[in-house]
Image (cartoon, coloured by chain):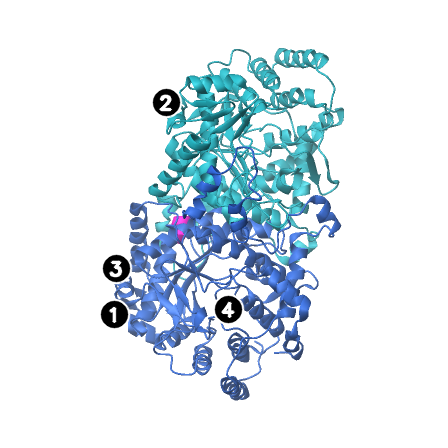
Chain colours: A cyan, B blue
Amino acid sequence: MTEDTRTRRSGGREGRKAMRASSHGSAEAFLTRTMKPFEIISDEGLELLEHNADTILEEVGVEIRDYPSALDRFRDAGADVSGTRVRFPRGLCRQLVQATAPAVYTQHARNPERNVQIGGDATVFAPNYGSPFAHDLDNGRRYATIADFENFVKLAYMSPYLHHSGGTVCEPVDVPVHKRHLDMVYTHLRYSDKPFMGSVTAGERAADSVELARIGFGGDLQDRTVMTSLINASSPLVWDATMLAAAEVYASANQATIITPFILAGAMAPATSAGVAAQTLAESLAGMAFTQLVRPGAPVIFGSFASSMSMQTGAPTFGTPEPAIVLYTVAALARRLGVPFRSGGSLCASKLPDAQAAYESAATLQPTILGGVNFVLHAAGWLEGGLAIGYEKFVLDCDQLGMMATFVKGLDLSDNGQALDAIKEHQPGMHFLGTAHTLANFETAFYRSSTADNSSYEQWLDEGSLDAAQRANKVWKEQLAAYEPPPIDDAIDEELREYIARRKAVLPDSFA
Amino acid sequence: MTEDTRTRRSGGREGRKAMRASSHGSAEAFLTRTMKPFEIISDEGLELLEHNADTILEEVGVEIRDYPSALDRFRDAGADVSGTRVRFPRGLCRQLVQATAPAVYTQHARNPERNVQIGGDATVFAPNYGSPFAHDLDNGRRYATIADFENFVKLAYMSPYLHHSGGTVCEPVDVPVHKRHLDMVYTHLRYSDKPFMGSVTAGERAADSVELARIGFGGDLQDRTVMTSLINASSPLVWDATMLAAAEVYASANQATIITPFILAGAMAPATSAGVAAQTLAESLAGMAFTQLVRPGAPVIFGSFASSMSMQTGAPTFGTPEPAIVLYTVAALARRLGVPFRSGGSLCASKLPDAQAAYESAATLQPTILGGVNFVLHAAGWLEGGLAIGYEKFVLDCDQLGMMATFVKGLDLSDNGQALDAIKEHQPGMHFLGTAHTLANFETAFYRSSTADNSSYEQWLDEGSLDAAQRANKVWKEQLAAYEPPPIDDAIDEELREYIARRKAVLPDSFA
C-alpha cells in the first residue's frame, strides 16, 4: 500500500457528486437470470461431445506432472495409472463429480449482504485477472503496481455491477513474487468487503491465502466457503504440480476452485469448436474429479476459457464467433453435468478502449449472459488479450454489466408494465411524455448509462467532443477521489498485518 | 452522380490488394440461421400481449389522416369507422394478415445470384437508412450528398456481408427533394446488383420507383417482388396519407413493404417494454392489414423500431437493455403471426465510431441475430441516433456482420469438426500448431476480422498505434479506390436515364 493512494480517499464534493451521478440505484449481490439459456445444439450433439470427452479420458488420458499424490488418488479411485499418465474408465470422472460436487454454493463475503450464490440462475461478475500491465489514457501502458492493484480493488468495490472483488486483478510487479500474494489478499480484505479469490501460484501461497481469510473472517472456514480461486490446466491434457497443489489446499479447506482449461484453439487444442469443447470437458472433468477426491463436496466450478487464434501470427483473438460457439456449447455441457460454470467476460485483443475493444468485449459478454454463465471472471478492465488492465476500459465495461443486470430481469408483464390503461386513455397522435404513467415510471423506465453521450451534436461539441474513453477517464478519477473504505475490526486488521509481516520476514525477495 | 466519383473506379493495384485482404471468401446471398431464436417470455405472456393489441385496436383504434380511400377499405372489411378513426373487431386485422400475407418471399435482385429470401430462417442485412449527415474521420460531420450516397452504395455492393443495397442510405441533400428519389433508385440499379428499396416520401415517388425498377429488371413486375420499402407509422396509432399512398402503390404492384411503428418509448408509446410491444403489434397489424386489403398476398414485413429515451433530455438512447427486450418480444409475436420480421441493426447514439458506438451497436445487433430478425435495416453505418452515416462505422459494422455470418452456422459436428482423431493422435502437452488437422483447417478455422488489430503491442506501436476507427478509415478508401461497377445492359441504362431526365424536367426544384 503506498501512502498516496491511501490518503486519496477523502474525495470531496465533486467526487461524491460524480459517484451519485454514476450510481444507478441499489446494488444486487448477484444477478438472477429469468430467461432460459440460449441453446445452440441438440441433446444428441451434447451427448456426442460427452462421448468424445470420455474417449479422450479413456484413450489419451491426462498427464500429471510432478505430483505423485494425485496419481495415487486417481489410482485408488479406479483410474489406470501408467507412469505419469492417468487414463479413466468411461464415465468415472463424471461419476466422481456428480456424486459429491454441489450444483450451487454460497461464497461468503466479509459483508454478509454481499454473499454470492454461485450456480443455478445466478451470475456473478468479477473483474479482470492476471494482467502484468496497466493502461490509462494519461500514462499509456506500463507495468502494473500495487497502487494499480489497490485502485482496481477500490473501483470494483464501488461499482454496483461487480459482485466480486476478483483475485489478481493485475500483477503488482513492484512487489516481490514471493510476497505479493500477501499484499493482494490483504487489499481485497481491507479495501473491499465483496467476496474474493486466493493465490494459486504455489501451494504455500494458497495456504497463506486460506490463513489470511481465516483471520479476516474471524474464525474457522470449514463450514463456509469464502474464496473461489482459479486453477488452470496446462492444455492439452496436462495438470502441473503448482495448480494441483493449490487446488488441493483449497479443496481441503472447503474453499472453491474454478477448474479451467485455458485453450487457444489451434495451439492447445484442435482448431475446431467441437474439438475444443470435448477437450475442455475432458480436462475439466479430470481436474474437478481431483478436487472431489481431495474432499468430497468441496465446491468446484467447471471453467472454460477458449479463444480463437490469428492463423497468420499465432496471436489470440477475441470477440470472434468461434469462442462464442464454444461458450454456448460448454455452458450446456456444464448444465448437464450439474455444476456451476465459469467462462466469458469482457474479453478483447485491442490495446485501447476503442471500438475494437467494445465490439470484441460485447461479442463475449452477450454469450456470457445468454449462455447462462455463473461466474464471470474478466468482466471489467480486460485489454490486449489480458496483458493489460485498462482504467477506462474498466469503467466502460462496468456500465455494460449494469445493462446486463437490467436485461436479465426480462419483460415486466405487471399491469404497470403492460400500460394498457395508459394507451387506452390516450388519443392517437398525442405524445406520452407528460402522462401520469410516464411520470410514474420516469426514474426507473430505462437503464441510464454512466458513460454514453446521448446529447445533441451541438451540445456534445460544446462539451469538448469527447469520445467514450475520454469520458470514462473522468469517471474513474472521480470514483477514486470519492472512495471510502468499508469498516473493518481494528483487531482483525492488526492480526492480518502481523501475519503478513511475519511471513514477509521469512520469504525471499526474488522477483523471478 | 458527380464526375469525380464516377472516374474513381479504376482503383489500381493497391486498392485491389486491399480488397482481397478484406474479402473473406465467397459471399452468401443471405444468412440461414441454424439456431432456434432466443425466447424471453412464455406463450402465455405472448398471448397476453396479443390480447392487449386487440384491445387497443378495438377500443382506441387507429387514426387515418387525409386518406379517405383507406377508411373505405377498412369499413368494407368490417371495421368500425367513425370520422377518421378506425376501430377493429378483435382479431380482424390478424385474420386479414394471416389469410393472405406470405410467411416467406423472395426479393429478386438485378443479379439473380443475389436474390434474397425474406422470412423463415433467413436474415438479410441492409445498410443504414435516412441520415441527413455523413461522417468520416477526415472531414467530420457534414450534410450528406449524392456523392456520399454513391459511395455507400458502392461500399455496400463490395461488402460480402451486406445482402441488400438498402434505400435512402443517406439523404443526398444536394439534390432537390422532388428529384432525389430518381437519383437514388438509379444509383442502386447502376452501381450495385443487390436488391434494394424504393422511395416512400410520396405516392408518385413510389410510382417512379416502381417504373424505374420495371425498366431496370426489363419487364413486368407483377410476378416478382424486386423492392422492399419502408413504411413508418406516425406513432402513437396514426397512419398518414404519405405512407399509406406509398404502401398502396407498392402493394398494388406486388412489391413488399415493411410496416414499422417507429417508437421512442416514453414519447410515442408508454415507457414500459410490454406497453411498447403491444402498441407496436396493434399499429403494425393495422398497417399490414391495409396492404392485404389493397392486394391480397402482397409481401409485407412486420417492422418494429423501438428505442429507449434519456429521461433528462428526451433524446433517443440505443444499446440499452429495454429495446433488446422489446426486440426479443416483438420477434416472437411476429413468428406467431407468421410474417417476416424487421428490427434491430447496428444502432447507436454516439457521434463517433468509438467504444460507445461499438457497445451500443453490438447490444442491438446480437439480439437482432439471436431474436431471429429476418430483415435488418441499419445493419451498417449508423451513428448519432441515425442522424449521420459514418464511413468508418460502416466498415467496422460490416466486419461484425461477417462474424454473425459465421456464428449463425453454429457448431460443426462433422468428423473434422469433432477432431477426435487429432486429439487421440496427440500427446498431452504438445501443441497443435503444426498438426495435419490444424493445417487442414488453417484457412477456414476462424473468422478473420478485417479491422481488428491482433498483433503484439510492440508491432502495433511500430505501425502507428492506430485505433479501430483509424484502421477503418484506410479500409473504406481502399475499397472505393478498387470499386468496379457490376455490368448493366446499355439499352436498359439508357432507358433509365431517359426516364429520369423526362421526370426531372417536369418536377420542381424545391429543396423544401
Q: CA distance from mark 4 to mark 1?
A: 36 Å
| Left or right relative to A301: residue B102 | left
Q: Earlier in the sequence, mark 4 or mark 1?
A: 1
Front residue of this view, candidates B267 and A504: A504
- Label 2 vs label 1, nearer the camera: 2
The answer to whether residue A130 shows anywhere in this view is: yes
Classify mark 3: helix, strand or loop: loop
Q: CA distance from mark 2 to mark 3?
A: 54 Å
Q: Quadrant of the N terminus of chain B?
A: bottom right
Height in image: A215 above or below B448? above
- Point out which mark residue B322 bears: none
- Point out which mark residue B77 bears: 1
Front residue of this view, candidates A52 and B392: A52
Q: CA distance from mark 4 to mark 2?
A: 57 Å
Looking at the rendered structure, the kind of residue marked 2 is Ala
Disc 2 marks which residue?
A99
Give the crowd class for mark 2: few <14, some 14-19, many >=20 residues within 10 Å: few
Residue A303: % across, % down:
49, 32
Residue B214: % across, % down:
43, 81
Q: CA distance from mark 2 to mark 1?
A: 65 Å
Residues rendered magenta in the picture: B273-277
Callout 3 and callout 4 share a chain: yes
> Total of numbered circles in the picture?
4
Classify mark 4: helix, strand or loop: loop
Disc 3 marks which residue?
B91
Residue A491: % across, % down:
63, 10
- Point out which mark residue B165 bears: 4
